[in-house]
């Protein structure tokens, strides 16, 4: 069984004590590749170092996370850095997406204008460079959907990471273009809205993720998440769709490989 974790933060400090072991556990669980979204410049060096050390299994994205805009007077400089890196990637680095970008009004709604400006600029960069986007949305789906609808037929494509909305929101976003939906540990939670939506979504629109070290799936909820646990997401999706885990792995891996064009079979 071959899996891809389409959203892993394995470079974060939570893995400083056992990063190599966590990568080995992912490989043992069938995870052939990890896609690593950027957050901001404070973590770029860690991200690039891991991808250079393990180019066979770790592929980076580049982007500015919406919460890195909040209370940050230098956020436009951060965006300029993202643009420079896209134009001239560091040696040994090939970006598979513009991410992690988005809107997040959970912690504060005071930076809506700034986050929306950054989102639009990064959507435009993704279109310019022919890359997909990895989109983070928290407490902001009405606003996100409205922006994405403005980009209909623009060539914008990508994945809505950690998707946890109803089937109507899925349909509205999917109608905007070539989009897939990242399903992670939340699908394993009791009374999960994600589970109800996944039952109705075609498997061809799903990719699997962990968002590690966050959003740990059952049976490890409450512990640190890691990429090896994407298999629990796969198994839950399989149960919801009345399919085998092998079928879900095959189709979702193919979906991820097609979306993120730098991924090779």
Image (tube, rainbow, N blue to C red):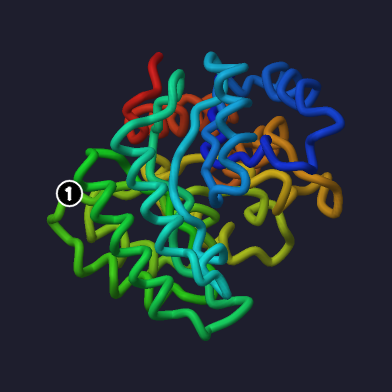
Front-lying residue, 6 or 207: 6
| Left or right side of 190 for 247 | left
Tally of numbered tags: 1
| Left or right side of 26 for 14 | right
Q: Is residue 202 above or below residue 135?
A: above
Q: In terms of image quadrants, where is residue 72?
A: bottom right
Give the residue furthest to the bottom: 110
Q: Is residue 116 above or below residue 194?
A: below
Mark 1 secondary-structure assignment? loop
Q: Is residue 234 above or below residue 92?
A: below
Residue drawn at x 42%, y 33% as measured from the top left: 256
Quickly name the residue at label 1. Answer: 155
Instruction: Locate the N terminus by quadrant.
Output: top right
| Left or right side of 125 for 228 | right
Residue drawn at x 67%, y 36% as measured from the top left: 11
Front-lying residue, 214 or 81: 81
């Amino acid at each position: 069984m071959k899996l891809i974790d389409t959203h892993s933060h394995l470079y974060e400090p939570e893995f400083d004590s056992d990063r190599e072991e966590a990568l080995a556990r992912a490989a043992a669980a069938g995870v052939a590749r990890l896609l690593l979204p950027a957050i901001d410049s404070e973590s770029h060096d860690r991200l690039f170092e891991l991808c250079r050390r393990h180019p066979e299994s770790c592929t980076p994205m580049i982007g500015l996370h919406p919460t890195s805009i909040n209370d940050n007077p230098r956020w436009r400089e951060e965006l300029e850095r993202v643009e420079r890196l896209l134009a001239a990637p560091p040696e040994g680095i090939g970006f598979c997406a513009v991410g992690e970008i988005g809107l997040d009004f959970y912690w504060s709604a005071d930076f809506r204008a700034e986050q929306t400006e950054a989102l639009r600029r990064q959507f435009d960069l993704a279109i310019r460079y022919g890359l997909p986007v990895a989109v983070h949305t928290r407490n902001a789906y009405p606003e996100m959907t409205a922006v994405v609808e403005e980009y209909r037929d623009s060539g914008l494509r990508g994945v809505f990471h950690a998707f946890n909305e109803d089937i109507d929101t899925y349909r509205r976003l999917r109608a905007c273009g070539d989009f897939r939906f990242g399903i992670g540990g939340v699908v394993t939670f009791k009374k999960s809205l994600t589970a109800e939506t996944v039952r109705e979504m075609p498997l061809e629109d799903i990719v699997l993720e962990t968002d590690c070290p966050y959003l740990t799936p059952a049976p490890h909820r409450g512990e640190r998440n890691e990429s090896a646990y994407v298999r629990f997401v796969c198994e839950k999706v399989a149960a919801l769709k009345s399919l085998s885990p092998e079928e879900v792995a095959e189709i979702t891996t193919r979906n991820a490989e097609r979306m993120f064009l730098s991924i090779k079979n």
